[in-house]
Amino acid sequence: MSDQPKDRFLRINEVLDRTALSRATLYRKIQDGTFPKQVRIAARCAGWRESEVTEWMYNPQYYQVDEAR
């Protein structure tokens, strides 16, 4: 078993609350590659990894999506 803490998935409303972004700005940043991409959780459900949102919050101006993720 791994010693690393489990990464939670955040839904859209929690991401908007934490980042103070509007929904339109959030999706524009995803398109531009300056905000983490959504992760498919189920057929009609997606979210963001909490660790990636937290990383973005530490340095939002210079964040770039790592395509290897």
Image (cartoon, rainbow, N blue to C red):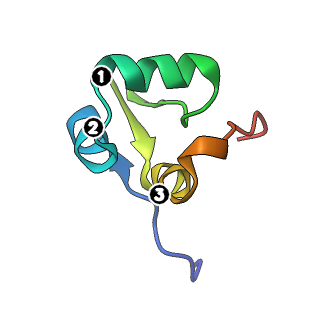
Name of the residue lying farthest toward the right: 68
What amino acid does circle 3 point to? Thr
Of mark 2 and mark 3, the one earlier in the sequence is: 2
Of mark 1 and mark 3, the one earlier in the sequence is: 1
Q: Residue at point 46% right, 49% down? A: 53
Q: x, y percentage for residue 7? A: 46, 60
Instruction: Please tell me how crowded label 1 is: few (under 14), some (14-19), or many (20+) other residues with Cα within 10 Å.
Output: few
Q: Are marks 2 and 1 in contact (CB under 8 Å)?
A: yes
State the image quarter where residue 10 is shown. top left
Q: Residue at point 29% right, 22% down? A: 23
| Numbered badge on residue 54 | 3
Mark-to-mark CA distance, 1 and 3? 18 Å
Mark-to-mark CA distance, 2 and 1? 7 Å
- Quadrant the C terminus occupies: top right
Residue 41, compared with residue 60, is above or below; it is above
Near-viewer residue (34 or 4): 34
Residue 4, compared with residue 55, is above or below; it is below
| Numbered badge on residue 23 | 1
Residue that mark 2 sits on:
16
